Image (cartoon, rainbow, N blue to C red):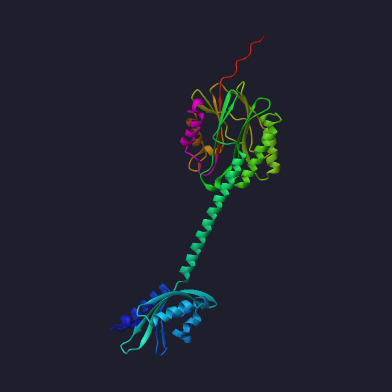
Amino acid sequence: MVRRLVHSADPQHESRALELLSHAQRLGNMGWAEWDLESGEALWSDHLYVIFGRSRAQGPIRLHELPAHVDSADAQTLDRLLWKVTREPEPVQAEFRVRRDGGVRNVRAVLERVEGKSGRVGVHGLIQDITSRRRAERIVSQSRRELSEAREQAAVDRQVTLAMRDAILPQPGTTVELPHSRIAVRYVPAEKTANLGGDWYEAAPLPDGRVLLAIGDVAGHGLEVIAQMAQLRHALLGLSMTGRPADLLLSWLNDLVRHRLDGTTATAIVGHLDPASGGFVWSQAGNLPPVLVREGVARRLRPPDGLLLGVDEWAYEQARITLRPDDVLLMFTDGLVERRHRDIDEGLAHTLTAAAKLRPASLEEDLDRLLEEIGGPNPEDDACLLAVHMREFPPRRRPG
């Protein structure tokens, strides 16, 4: 068959054509065969011996012997192929596995029944080794399956994380109405599924009339970090019942992180607001300082000395400020201003510009607008915001 295809009166041309055909068979990992159905004789190309792992000394496999070299699971496939090719004039094809060198190879065969001028009937075949292709397809299929499973697991983990976070934190997006003050909060989850972190906030009235205001962030992401955040926040709520100042509360939280949450670090701001006087006394542990909005001007407060929770033993300091009626105090975690593609100073500048537009009459809407103006949700990290609006103070009693 092949010699007829490349037959030429020029022996050099014929030799070159045969060389090119042999090269094409190697590149395509395929070979050809001729089987004489009357005599049983077979003729194979060189590369077909390679595909079946046979030496030329062993000779070609006769057509009726071929099923003995096929994987038992594919024996019926080959039987049907041979039955059809000996009875139908149209080419037939099938894919099956052959045993070779203790392993299995995937091959595709195209067979055609032919009749010579002398009336002799034979079968011509083209067989290609597609083992590498099938292996690559299995790898791709496995990768897709693993990716799909990973996405499904990530979605489940996110739902569990969101449910756990929602069970721990106060309901975000609501307003807390207190005497002489109003507090609005926002929690903005990271856009990426795996990056829900340990940001938290707290705004709770205390028995002595003051209001505990706190915000913070446990380093990292995932369920373990959410659990650590819960321990930290719940510990602060319990400790705040002692009425002790913010600097001491942070010292106690630092001891908790260092000794009970080994290897963890966290940032925090803890402060006490006196709604009757507007006095706000606060301490910080590595968190960005609050922003004060007064008469349309936004500025960062000067932070007292403080170190990240969990790093080392530290004596935290306090700072004091008196809020006036219609002042807005904005506290936030670093996920609000940090972005991978920009410097943190640029993020802070955007935040100050947007914060200057906060108005007490539309505080909730203005918080949402602020988030949009600074770039929306952070793809890499979540963020918490806590805004306090001071109202008119009660009139002072005159001495009797």
Horizontal relation, residue 35 to residue 356: left or right? left
The answer to whether one can see residue 128 in this image is no
Residue 338, position as x, y percentages in the image: 52, 39
Rendered view: 325 above or below 227: above
Using the image as rendered, state which of residue 215 and residue 70 is in the foreground. Answer: 70
Rendered view: 269 above or below 12: above
- Does the stretch in magenta take in 92? no
Using the image as rendered, state which of residue 76 and residue 395 is in the foreground. Answer: 76
- Identify the image quadrant of the N terminus: bottom left
The answer to whether one can see residue 190 in this image is yes
Horizontal relation, residue 121 to residue 285: left or right? left
Residue 111, position as x, y percentages in the image: 39, 79
Residue at the farthest left position: 9
- Identify the image quadrant of the C terminus: top right
Rendered view: 394 above or below 292: above
- Does the stretch in magenta take in 360? yes
Residue segment shown in magenta: 356-382
- How many numbered marks have been drawn onto this rendered protein structure? 0
Residue at 48% across, 79% down: 52
Residue at 67% across, 35% down: 236
